[in-house]
Structures are given as C-alpha cells and as structure tokens.
Amino acid sequence: MIGSSGGMLFAPGRRTPVTAVLRDAGFTRPPAQEAQGATDSAVQVIPLSAEVLAEHDADTVLVPQGAYYDAAAVRAVPTFAQLPAVVQGRSLQVDGDMWFGNFAFAVDWIVTDLQALVAGAGQAGMGTPDQALARWAAFDETVAPADDGPAG
C-alpha cells in the first residue's frame, strides 16, 4: 500500500489495523517496507520517498483515497507511474477512510475488498463510498441476523 496524506507519501506502519488484517490474510509487504518499519513497532506510518519508490513495488499496489488520503497525489509521482505493478495494471484504489478504520465494519470492508482482489475482480471489486449502505446492510446481517421472533 502506498498512500499520500498532507503531501507525505507513506505505507501503513506495523501496528495499524489494516496491516494486521493484511498480514493475517497472508499478504506481505515489499522488503523495503519491512526493513524500514521493522525497528519500531509503534510506527503508525512508514514515510516513503519518491526517489526510492521503486523499492516499494509489489504484486499489487493499493492506493487509498478518502477524506485524509489523496490517491491523485500518489499517481502524480513520476516514479509511481513507472512501478511494474502500475504499468501492468496491478494498482488498485481503495477507500482509505475504511481501510484505515479501526472498527469492525472497516475490517469487514477490507476483508470484502481482499476477497474481490483474490478473486480477480480488479478495480470493480474495490468498495466505494456509494456502496457503503449496501455493504453496511450485508455486514449488519452477518453480525446481527434478523430476529424472526421468539422461538416456539
């Protein structure tokens, strides 16, 4: 994952919920991110430099967009456009507000996106804000199925 917030390029740190979900789902980071974030378990973000962005290429590069996340700023970095994952169409935009959430619905959102990613759905499988109500309804039904009345 490569993001931008406040003009800074970053990858999520080791102790963020999104990192835990990705790790538990079997996803790994580029070695440069592992090396950079390995020394401090309290790091929330790993600052990235445009000059060394090539070291942060991966099989798939996820780029968050949202209230605090600027996907266009990431895509505008010339070295980002040269990453093999980007050139080969393996870069996807994700809802940064959900991917960096630390609540159950956000984790469900990430897992739903990851299932679509693994299934090969591409960008069409990544959740967007206009899908939030439908995703909430599916999540709500999963965690609290409709009560059909008293058992009898």
Image: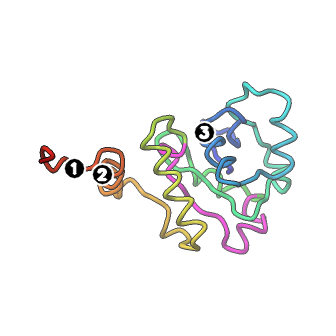
Estimate how packed mark 1 is, as few (under 14), some (14 to 19) or many (20 or more) residues with alpha carbons within 10 Å.
few
- Identity of the residue drawn at 13% across and 43% down: 150
Residue at mark 3: 5
140 or 49, nearer to the observer: 140
- Percent position of residue 29, x then y: 77, 51
Residue 92 included in the magenta stretch of the image: yes
Q: Which amino acid does label 1 sit on?
A: Ala
Q: Which amino acid does label 2 sit on?
A: Glu
Estimate how packed mark 2 is, as few (under 14), some (14 to 19) or many (20 or more) residues with alpha carbons within 10 Å.
few
Helix, strand or loop at mark 3: strand
Q: Which of marks 2 and 3 is nearer the N terminus?
A: 3
Between the C-alphas of marks 2 and 3, the distance is 34 Å
- Identity of the residue drawn at 46% across and 49% down: 108
Q: Which of marks 1 and 2 is nearer the N terminus?
A: 2
Q: What residue type is labelled 3?
A: Ser
Residue 23 included in the magenta stretch of the image: no
Helix, strand or loop at mark 2: helix
Residue at mark 2: 141
Estimate how packed mark 3 is, as few (under 14), some (14 to 19) or many (20 or more) residues with alpha carbons within 10 Å.
some
136 or 87, nearer to the observer: 136
Please tell me the numbered disc located at residue 146: 1
1 or 26, nearer to the observer: 26
Relative to 80, say whether 105 is above or below. Answer: above
Contact between labelled residues 2 and 1, with CB atoms less than 8 Å apart: yes
Helix, strand or loop at mark 1: loop
Q: Decide if residue 34 is on the left or right side of residue 113.
A: right
Please tell me the numbered disc located at residue 11: none
- Identity of the residue drawn at 61% across and 45% down: 21
Magenta residues span 80-99
- Percent position of residue 111, x then y: 53, 53
Q: Decide if residue 138 is on the left or right side of residue 65.
A: left
For the residues carrying marks 2 and 3, which lies nearer the camera in this image? Answer: 2
